[in-house]
Image (cartoon, rainbow, N blue to C red):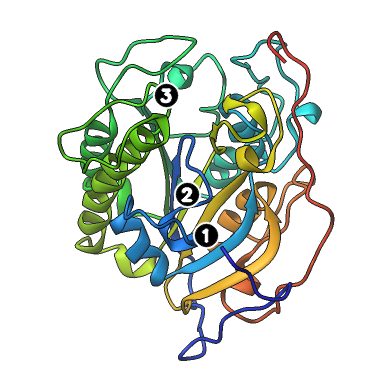
Amino acid sequence: SGSAAPGSVVPAAKAPERPAGPLNVILLTIDCLRQDMPWAGYPKPIAPNLTKFASESVVYTHAYSVSSYTAKSVAAFLTSRYPSTLYRSGYFFTDYAKSNVFLAEVLHDHGVFTMGLHAHKYFSGSSQLDQGFDIWKLVPGITFDPTTDKDITSDKLTDLGMKVLGDPANTSKPFFAWLHYLDPHDQYLLHPESPNFGKGNRARYDGEVFFTDLHIGRLLEFAKRQPWWGKTAVIVSADHGEAFGEHGVYRHAFWLWDVLTRVPLVVHAPGAAPARIDVKRSQVDLAPTVLDLEGIRDRPPSFVGRSLVPEIYGSEKPADRDPIVLDLPEDSHN
């Protein structure tokens, strides 16, 4: 997609105004979601719900994950640190030590109710990514395959999300909910709900994105009907991208090419006017941004990122910052 000059923001129709009080935050991350989505110029209508959502939100056109596969990139955005600096095991499906400070721990300690909902066995608990979460659930019936994903889960994850977010016991206080959708991950399975986007892996992947978007659309429509919607921010991003032959590589995890690390980042916050921000940003900024939205000013000294909230609400002009750092530390497979 074309981009404007660094730091530019498309002028909004009205001046954004940040609400006086703290917000709830829902973080939706989608496994393997490439940056070249319809709202970024991709010509096929593979994500109609998220495309409409992006048109109503602040869209970052040059956002980057920290690494190129789930175990490293997720830990990075949950800790606002680079994975090579975290205490961790040496395995590809990395376990993280409890001595690391995670976003949910900080939120929990400040009275925020924390929920994590997932669709892959890696998130079963031994990885320690659940540190600080009051609720940590996986969709039922999934299997573990270390080489691929054979399950279809977006429908089940949205159902689980609506159940958990529809319970006033979980949402009558400040809350943070993270849902990680997995279906765009290979295997690229066919779905009767998805149009036929053509032949080949990219076309089947596009169908997977459409299926995931369909069920994220259900979740968003549900959320808009809830009493807490008016004071809730939603962040949509991905843990990494996916390669379909660019640079001679396929899938993800063993390289740091742009196609694997440049990801969507869409922020919908009450009072924030739609805009496009074209400067480079890193997912190490996600955890500080969530803390800021939740009204928490205390930032752990271990966090290296910075809040995006001032530029989301227009009180600070986006500007180039430090170089974007990518990090793929050595492990059993890398």
| Residue 72 locus on image (x, y percent) | 65, 28
Q: Please give the residue where the numbered disc 2 appears in the rendered image.
A: 112
Q: CA distance from mark 2 to mark 1?
A: 8 Å
- Say which of marks 2 and 1 sits in front: 1
Sequence order check, earlier mark of 2 and 3: 2
Determine if residue 77 is in view.
no
As drawn, 290 above or below 10: above
Query: Of 110 and 304, which appears nearest the observer?
Result: 304
Residue 282 vs residue 120: left or right? right
Disc 1 residue crowd, few under 14, some 14–19, many 20+, Cα 10 Å: many
Look at 28% across and 28% down and name the residue there: 153
- The quarter of the image holding the C terminus is top right
Write down the quadrant of residue 92 in the picture. Answer: top right
What amino acid is found at the position of numbered circle 3 in the picture?
A: Asp
| Residue 274 locus on image (x, y percent) | 46, 76
Residue 186's disc is: 3
Look at 26% across and 53% down and name the residue there: 217
Residue 294's disc is: 1
Disc 2 residue crowd, few under 14, some 14–19, many 20+, Cα 10 Å: many
